[in-house]
Amino acid sequence: MVVNKTQELDKITEDIIADDVCPDLRGGATQLVPGSGNPDSDILFIGEAPGKKEDETGVPFVGAAGKFLDVMLESIDMDREDVFITNIVKYRPPDNRDPLPAEISAFMPYLIRQLAVIRPKVVVTLGRFSMNVFLPNDKIGHIHGQPQRIDLSIREDLGDLQTIDIPKEQIVLMPLYHPAAALYNGGQREVLLEDFSQIPRLLEEISRQ
Protein backbone atom coordinates (compact mmCIF):
# COMPACT_ATOMS: atom_id res chain seq x y z
CA MET A 1 0.00 0.00 0.00
CA VAL A 2 1.30 3.42 -0.97
CA VAL A 3 1.21 5.84 1.96
CA ASN A 4 0.92 9.48 0.93
CA LYS A 5 2.07 12.51 2.87
CA THR A 6 -1.40 13.29 4.22
CA GLN A 7 -1.64 9.79 5.68
CA GLU A 8 1.83 10.10 7.18
CA LEU A 9 0.93 13.43 8.79
CA ASP A 10 -2.32 11.94 10.09
CA LYS A 11 -0.29 9.13 11.67
CA ILE A 12 1.87 11.71 13.48
CA THR A 13 -1.29 13.33 14.84
CA GLU A 14 -2.57 9.93 15.99
CA ASP A 15 0.75 9.24 17.70
CA ILE A 16 0.67 12.54 19.61
CA ILE A 17 -2.73 11.54 20.97
CA ALA A 18 -1.75 7.93 21.65
CA ASP A 19 1.47 8.98 23.38
CA ASP A 20 -0.47 11.52 25.47
CA VAL A 21 2.14 14.22 24.94
CA CYS A 22 2.02 16.94 27.63
CA PRO A 23 -1.10 15.70 29.46
CA ASP A 24 -1.27 18.89 31.55
CA LEU A 25 -1.52 20.98 28.40
CA ARG A 26 -3.98 18.56 26.85
CA GLY A 27 -6.18 18.75 29.94
CA GLY A 28 -6.50 22.51 29.65
CA ALA A 29 -6.95 22.65 25.88
CA THR A 30 -10.02 22.17 23.74
CA GLN A 31 -8.24 20.11 21.10
CA LEU A 32 -4.97 19.28 19.42
CA VAL A 33 -3.77 21.71 16.72
CA PRO A 34 -1.39 19.57 14.63
CA GLY A 35 -1.05 21.82 11.57
CA SER A 36 -2.76 22.39 8.25
CA GLY A 37 -2.11 23.21 4.62
CA ASN A 38 -0.46 21.61 1.63
CA PRO A 39 1.75 18.63 2.60
CA ASP A 40 3.55 18.95 -0.74
CA SER A 41 4.43 22.58 -0.10
CA ASP A 42 7.90 24.02 -0.65
CA ILE A 43 7.42 26.14 2.49
CA LEU A 44 6.82 25.03 6.07
CA PHE A 45 5.86 27.74 8.58
CA ILE A 46 6.50 26.99 12.25
CA GLY A 47 5.12 29.08 15.11
CA GLU A 48 5.38 28.47 18.84
CA ALA A 49 1.97 27.29 20.10
CA PRO A 50 -1.77 27.67 19.44
CA GLY A 51 -3.71 30.60 20.89
CA LYS A 52 -7.36 30.93 21.84
CA LYS A 53 -8.79 30.96 18.31
CA GLU A 54 -6.54 28.11 17.23
CA ASP A 55 -7.61 26.07 20.24
CA GLU A 56 -11.26 26.64 19.30
CA THR A 57 -10.90 25.80 15.61
CA GLY A 58 -8.07 23.26 15.58
CA VAL A 59 -6.33 25.29 12.85
CA PRO A 60 -3.04 27.17 13.39
CA PHE A 61 -2.74 30.94 12.91
CA VAL A 62 -6.40 31.89 12.56
CA GLY A 63 -6.47 34.69 15.14
CA ALA A 64 -5.27 38.26 14.69
CA ALA A 65 -1.68 37.18 14.04
CA GLY A 66 -2.96 34.65 11.52
CA LYS A 67 -4.82 37.34 9.64
CA PHE A 68 -1.55 39.24 9.23
CA LEU A 69 0.14 36.03 8.09
CA ASP A 70 -2.57 35.84 5.40
CA VAL A 71 -1.70 39.42 4.38
CA MET A 72 1.97 38.51 4.13
CA LEU A 73 1.20 35.43 2.04
CA GLU A 74 -0.95 37.55 -0.26
CA SER A 75 1.94 39.99 -0.62
CA ILE A 76 3.94 37.25 -2.37
CA ASP A 77 0.95 35.94 -4.35
CA MET A 78 0.39 32.90 -2.14
CA ASP A 79 -2.29 31.68 0.22
CA ARG A 80 -2.70 28.98 2.83
CA GLU A 81 -3.36 26.30 0.23
CA ASP A 82 0.19 26.85 -1.05
CA VAL A 83 1.97 26.29 2.28
CA PHE A 84 1.92 24.13 5.40
CA ILE A 85 1.60 25.80 8.81
CA THR A 86 2.22 24.27 12.23
CA ASN A 87 3.57 25.07 15.70
CA ILE A 88 6.20 23.43 17.86
CA VAL A 89 3.79 22.88 20.77
CA LYS A 90 0.44 21.64 19.52
CA TYR A 91 -1.81 22.27 22.52
CA ARG A 92 -2.66 25.76 23.72
CA PRO A 93 -0.68 26.75 26.85
CA PRO A 94 -2.96 28.21 29.56
CA ASP A 95 -3.61 31.94 29.21
CA ASN A 96 -1.42 31.95 26.09
CA ARG A 97 1.73 31.80 28.20
CA ASP A 98 5.07 31.02 26.56
CA PRO A 99 5.71 27.30 25.99
CA LEU A 100 8.00 25.77 28.59
CA PRO A 101 11.30 24.12 27.60
CA ALA A 102 9.97 20.71 28.67
CA GLU A 103 6.87 21.16 26.50
CA ILE A 104 8.98 22.15 23.50
CA SER A 105 11.23 19.13 24.02
CA ALA A 106 8.22 16.81 24.31
CA PHE A 107 6.79 17.95 20.98
CA MET A 108 10.07 18.19 19.05
CA PRO A 109 10.10 14.57 17.80
CA TYR A 110 6.70 15.10 16.20
CA LEU A 111 7.75 18.41 14.63
CA ILE A 112 10.85 16.78 13.17
CA ARG A 113 8.69 13.95 11.82
CA GLN A 114 6.44 16.52 10.14
CA LEU A 115 9.51 18.15 8.63
CA ALA A 116 10.76 14.78 7.42
CA VAL A 117 7.42 14.03 5.72
CA ILE A 118 6.90 17.43 4.07
CA ARG A 119 10.57 18.01 3.17
CA PRO A 120 10.10 21.68 2.32
CA LYS A 121 12.67 23.75 0.46
CA VAL A 122 12.38 26.50 3.08
CA VAL A 123 11.46 26.35 6.76
CA VAL A 124 10.14 29.72 7.95
CA THR A 125 10.22 30.13 11.72
CA LEU A 126 7.79 32.64 13.17
CA GLY A 127 9.14 34.10 16.39
CA ARG A 128 12.09 33.40 18.65
CA PHE A 129 10.81 30.16 20.17
CA SER A 130 10.57 28.29 16.87
CA MET A 131 13.83 29.85 15.64
CA ASN A 132 15.71 28.79 18.77
CA VAL A 133 14.86 25.10 18.41
CA PHE A 134 16.89 25.18 15.20
CA LEU A 135 19.33 27.97 16.05
CA PRO A 136 19.65 27.82 19.84
CA ASN A 137 22.50 30.31 20.09
CA ASP A 138 21.13 33.07 17.86
CA LYS A 139 19.00 36.12 18.59
CA ILE A 140 16.12 36.89 16.25
CA GLY A 141 16.89 40.60 16.35
CA HIS A 142 20.26 39.86 14.75
CA ILE A 143 19.34 37.35 12.05
CA HIS A 144 15.67 37.90 11.11
CA GLY A 145 15.23 37.87 7.35
CA GLN A 146 18.65 36.26 6.81
CA PRO A 147 18.43 32.72 5.38
CA GLN A 148 20.45 30.14 7.30
CA ARG A 149 21.60 26.72 6.17
CA ILE A 150 21.45 24.17 8.97
CA ASP A 151 22.23 20.47 9.15
CA LEU A 152 20.01 18.66 11.65
CA SER A 153 21.82 15.37 11.12
CA ILE A 154 24.87 16.62 13.06
CA ARG A 155 22.95 18.20 15.93
CA GLU A 156 24.05 16.25 19.00
CA ASP A 157 21.56 18.10 21.19
CA LEU A 158 18.67 16.48 19.31
CA GLY A 159 19.55 13.17 20.93
CA ASP A 160 16.90 10.54 20.27
CA LEU A 161 15.59 12.53 17.31
CA GLN A 162 18.45 11.09 15.29
CA THR A 163 16.38 7.92 14.96
CA ILE A 164 13.89 9.89 12.86
CA ASP A 165 14.47 10.15 9.12
CA ILE A 166 15.85 13.68 9.39
CA PRO A 167 16.54 15.19 5.96
CA LYS A 168 20.19 14.55 5.22
CA GLU A 169 20.44 17.61 3.01
CA GLN A 170 20.89 20.98 4.66
CA ILE A 171 17.69 22.78 5.58
CA VAL A 172 17.27 26.39 4.53
CA LEU A 173 15.80 28.28 7.45
CA MET A 174 14.30 31.77 7.20
CA PRO A 175 13.86 33.26 10.69
CA LEU A 176 11.13 35.89 10.94
CA TYR A 177 9.54 37.83 13.76
CA HIS A 178 6.22 36.44 14.91
CA PRO A 179 3.27 38.05 13.07
CA ALA A 180 1.86 39.04 16.47
CA ALA A 181 4.75 41.49 16.77
CA ALA A 182 3.15 43.59 14.04
CA LEU A 183 -0.02 43.91 16.11
CA TYR A 184 1.81 45.72 18.89
CA ASN A 185 4.51 47.53 16.96
CA GLY A 186 3.71 49.21 13.65
CA GLY A 187 7.38 49.29 12.68
CA GLN A 188 7.56 45.53 12.89
CA ARG A 189 4.85 45.26 10.26
CA GLU A 190 7.11 46.77 7.59
CA VAL A 191 10.07 44.69 8.76
CA LEU A 192 8.02 41.51 8.47
CA LEU A 193 6.71 42.41 5.03
CA GLU A 194 10.23 43.23 3.85
CA ASP A 195 11.66 39.97 5.20
CA PHE A 196 8.72 38.03 3.77
CA SER A 197 9.29 39.52 0.31
CA GLN A 198 12.55 37.58 0.06
CA ILE A 199 10.87 34.18 0.15
CA PRO A 200 10.03 33.85 -3.60
CA ARG A 201 13.60 34.75 -4.59
CA LEU A 202 14.97 32.32 -2.01
CA LEU A 203 12.81 29.50 -3.39
CA GLU A 204 13.95 30.32 -6.91
CA GLU A 205 17.60 30.20 -5.89
CA ILE A 206 17.16 26.85 -4.16
CA SER A 207 15.34 25.41 -7.18
CA ARG A 208 18.30 26.35 -9.40
CA GLN A 209 20.81 24.54 -7.22
Image (cartoon, rainbow, N blue to C red):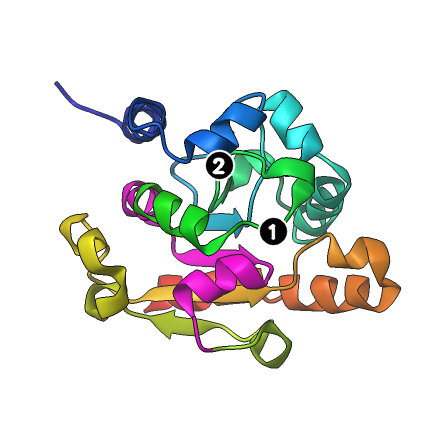
Amino acid type of the residue tagged 2 in the rendering: Lys
For mark 1, does the 10 Å Cα neighbourhood hold few (<14), some (14 to 19), or many (20 or more) residues?
Answer: few
Give the alpha-carbon distance from disc 2 to disc 1, as whole Å. Answer: 13 Å
Label 1 sits on residue: 98
Residue drawn where x is 49% and y is 27% of the image: 26
32 or 66, nearer to the observer:
32
Q: Quadrant of residue 207?
A: bottom left
Q: Element under label 1?
A: loop
- Which is closer to the viewer, label 2 or label 1? 1
In the picture, which quadrant includes the C terminus? bottom left
Q: Does 150 sit left or right of 145 as displayed?
A: left
Q: Does 69 sit left or right of 140 as displayed?
A: right
In this view, which residue lies farthest toward the top? 1
178 or 106, nearer to the observer:
106
Q: Earlier in the sequence, mark 2 or mark 1?
A: 2
Q: Position of residue 124 (x, y in %)?
A: 51, 57
Residue drawn where x is 30% and y is 22% of the image: 18
Label 2 sits on residue: 90
Q: Does 107 sit left or right of 11 as displayed?
A: right
User: Which span of residues is magenta-colored?
Assistant: 111-137
Residue 16 highlighted magenta (yes or no): no
For mark 2, does the 10 Å Cα neighbourhood hold few (<14), some (14 to 19), or many (20 or more) residues?
Answer: many
Q: Does 99 sit left or right of 149 as displayed?
A: right
For residue 59, the mark is: none
Q: Vertical placement of 174 versus 50: above or below?
A: below
Q: Element under label 2?
A: loop
Q: Quadrant of residue 50?
A: top right
Residue drawn where x is 63% and y is 37% of the image: 94
